[in-house]
Image (spheres, grey):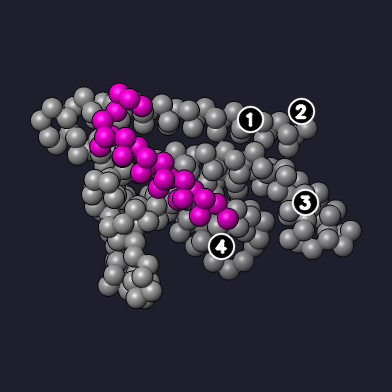
Amino acid sequence: MGWLGPEELEALKLSLRVSFWATLVTLPFGIFVAYALARWRFPGRQVLNGLVHLPLILPPVVTGYLLLLTFGIQGPIGGPLAGLGIVFAFRWTGAALAAGIMAFPLMVRAIRLSIEAVDPKLEQAGATLGASRLWVFVTVTLPMILPGVIAGTILAFAKAMGEFGATITFVSNIPGQTQTLPSAVYAFLQVPGGEAAAMRLVVISVIIAMGALLLSEFVGRRAAARVSGT
């Protein structure tokens, strides 16, 4: 990475940090929500499905503004958390929160499709042997959907790396604190002579995005072949 300047390298490191934590924290929730949407029938299921996919439909700036209203130091959630010393607004943790929310729909969709491809009779067979629902999920369902979980995780990580609108609205664009790859590209394009630095970050972004897509596609095909038994 010797061809990257200090600011560019800092933005890359922060993006990797934000994307890692955004993906790691949302993964358990993604698996739970995907399973609920794929297997359970309950009042409000379509509402939950709509809320999960809302970040894909809303303008990212709107999502960021809603996060600011909710998790800002004057917000209904951010206020009490700030009293405990937990602050999201204008911090890298807020960037991770925004990135995680924007990436969540892609994660849930990939995992849900993988769960729906599993024959429910296999899970029912485990239940008839006296296993609890959680144990059936851990020993039967999870091993079969693991490639789908990995694919969803990769897509979510790539989406988190590329998140811009919600992040810059919620945590601003502070070098060394909240300036991720996309916001660094934006910042470099605003100053004379910054095009070269912006292009270097664009190249890195394209490589990461294409690598994630190819890897996700490969894992997805392996998942389909594994479930079908071919």
Q: Quadrant of the N terminus?
A: top left
Q: Which residues lie in the magenta part?
A: 1-28
Category of crowding for the residue at label 2, using alpha-carbon neighbours closer than 10 angstroms: few (below 14), some (14–19), many (at least 20): few
Q: Secondary structure at mark 4?
A: helix
Position of residue 186 measured from the top left corner of the image (x, y, whole percent): 22, 38
Q: Is residue 38 visible?
A: yes
Q: Residue at x 49, y 62 (%)?
A: 47
Identify the residue under disc 4. Answer: 45
In the structure shown, which secondary structural element does the residue marked by tag 1 occupy? helix
**The label number, if any, that marks residue 221 in the structure image:** 1
Q: Is residue 76 left or right of residue 110?
A: left
Give the mark nearest the N terminus, 2 or 3.
3
- CA distance separating discs 3 and 4: 26 Å
Who comes first in sequence, dot 2 or dot 4?
4
Q: Main secondary structure of the magenta part?
A: helix
From mark 2 to mark 1, how far is it between C-alphas? 11 Å
* Magenta-colored stretch includes residue 82: no
